[in-house]
Amino acid sequence: MKIGFLLKELRSLKGVTQLKIANLLNVERSTYCKWETDKVTIDIYRLKDIAKIYGLDLEFMCRCFEAQKIISRDDVLRAIQLAEAKTNKIPSLAR
């Protein structure tokens, strides 16, 4: 999978804009857009920040990033549901 697919799916499933996520990461929306479209490779530190925003395990994000394997929207949704079940709450995107 391309990491952009994962970023877009996570954002879409949470119903937030690119601008909202870019603001949480303290980057320009255009930079975030380039990550989603795989025009620019995201570094591991930003991936860690994104995992934290969504309440996901960094390990899941890294496996997707390293393997570059195709996963489905359902796989992404299951990862989010698992993270929510572990914390017993939906990760907040408000800061």
Image (tube, helix red, strand yellow):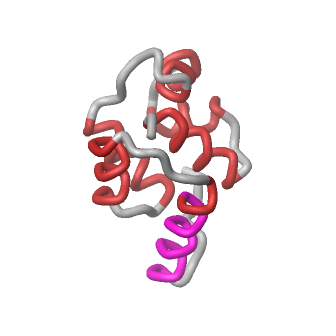
* Residue extent of the magenta highlight: 76-87
Residue 24 to residue 55: above or below: above
- The image shows a total of numbered marks equal to 0
Residue occupying the point 63% across, 32% down: 18
Q: Is residue 82 magenta?
A: yes
Residue 55 position (above or below residue 24): below
Q: Quadrant of the N terminus?
A: top left
Q: Determine whether 2 is above or below 72 in the image.
A: above
Image check: 39 left or right of 89? left
Give residue 31's position: percent from left, percent from top. Answer: 49, 18
* Residue 83: % across, % down: 47, 72
State which quadrant residue 66 falls in.
Answer: top left
Q: In the image, what residue occupies the spot 69% across and 37% down?
A: 17
* Left or right: residue 2 compared with residue 81: left
**Residue 36 at x, y = what percent?**
54, 29
- Residue 4 location, x and y as percent? 50, 33
Question: In the shown orientation, is residue 83 left or right of residue 93?
Answer: left
Q: What is the quadrant of residue 90 in the picture?
A: bottom right
The residue that appears at 60% across and 39% down in the rendered structure is 8
Residue 85 shown in magenta: yes
